[in-house]
Image: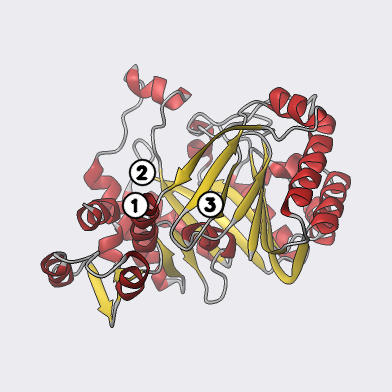
Amino acid sequence: MLSLYFHIPFCEHKCLYCDFYSVENMSSMETFVASLEREIELRGREAGGRQEVGTIFFGGGTPSLLTRAHFDRLFTRIHEHFRVAADAEVTCESNPGTVELSKLTEFRAAGFNRVSFGVQSFFDDDLRFLTRIHTAEEAERAAESAYRAGFANVNLDLIFALPGQTPERWRENLRRAAALRPAHISAYALIVEENTPLAVMVKNKLVAPLPDEEDAAMYEITIETLAGAGYRQYEVSNFARPGYECRHNMAYWNHADYLSFGPSAHSFRKDSQVTGRRWWNVRSVQSYIDALARDEFPVSGGEEVTREKFFDEEVFLGLRSTGVDLGRLERLYGAGIVTGKEGLLQELERSGLLRRQKSVIALTAKGYAVCDEIARRLIG
């Protein structure tokens, strides 16, 4: 089943830590939406039939800056060119400072059944540091408004390991998030990305990243606190109540096919069970609009996902989420693909980093904290 992603690049203000493609100038929004409609038409025709879609995700940027009329136009095009499953998961990312009950009610009526709020913190001084445009009170009000608008599936994004953040303060963030009863919580460590204002601040010693050991301690607090509140960890940074795991993200992690629309958006198609190809759109609103005005795909690059790369990704993504079936790897990639790793697997199991159930290996909560290192050792 296919997944669709839409990158809406507009923001009222670009946060100091964000390296996603976004723009603060919204003067081209109407033309951009028309271009999105055209890209949907072109991709739908290319597919040669109305493929079934299981998940749709509007991310950004700030998709909640679009209006009900914009979404009605886009969903009309989606349904014209794709066959959306009756139980499809349809998500809109939202900044709590850009929505109120009436707008969320309109989004629900437009076809969204899941909303994801970029809360990041329930402390206003943290939000000011991160240059978010909302307040903690607005974040709480947005979640409550989502329930009143008819959303049962609500996600809250949080960021930990902020400069100077204490374990007690992070626990309070988690407590306040859980108290809002969301179906899903995503918790990410603050990363200093290149070419962001935060990177410049760190370089100029205006702020200092939290030491690795404090970052790791907060991650352990995250796992323990959310487990105690009834959330199951099903990926390194993602926690859900039973049945509310994000199906769209799981499609990415399981190498499902996905088509993405909008500037900088990445797409993936399998050519076989163990090979595929990726491509990505131009990282410019104007170049994106110009290409579609010429009835051209706005693609700027691509790559073949070879058998070797596919294998590496299967191990890496599997370890980050629900586990890796070693028997399946042997069937797909040939006997002996994990030969020589038994000693390492036993070592990881004894250390409490990994658990095995028949041929499936999965990381424990402790193992998630060093997931990248474990993946490197298994792939190498």
Point out the frontmost of discs 3 and 1: 1
Q: Disc 3 marks which residue?
A: 157
| Badge 3 density bin: few <14, some 14–19, many ≥20, Cα 10 Å | some
Between 224 and 42, the residue placed more toward the observer is 42
In the image, what residue occupies the spot 49% across and 36% down? 125
Instruction: Report the amino acid beneath label 1.
Output: Glu
Q: Disc 2 marks which residue?
A: 161
Question: Marks 3/2: CA distance?
Answer: 14 Å
Q: Secondary structure at mark 3?
A: strand
Q: Quadrant of the N terminus?
A: bottom right
Point out the frontmost of discs 2 and 1: 1
> In which quarter of the view is residue 353 placed?
bottom left
Q: Secondary structure at mark 2?
A: loop
| Badge 2 density bin: few <14, some 14–19, many ≥20, Cα 10 Å | many
Q: Disc 1 marks which residue?
A: 308
Instruction: Report the amino acid beneath label 3.
Output: Asp
Between 54 and 303, the residue placed more toward the observer is 303
Asked whether disc 2 touches disc 1, contact meaning CB atoms under 8 Å apart, the reply is no
In the image, what residue occupies the spot 39% across and 38% down? 191
Question: Which percent across, then down, holds residue 279?
Answer: 56, 40
Q: Is residue 146 left or right of residue 250?
A: right
Instruction: Report the amino acid beneath label 2.
Output: Ala
Question: Which percent across, then down, holds residue 252?
Answer: 52, 57
Question: Which percent across, then down, holds residue 188?
Answer: 43, 49
Q: Is residue 347 above or below residue 41?
A: below
Is residue 335 among the parts visible in the rendering?
yes
Q: Earlier in the sequence, mark 2 or mark 1?
A: 2
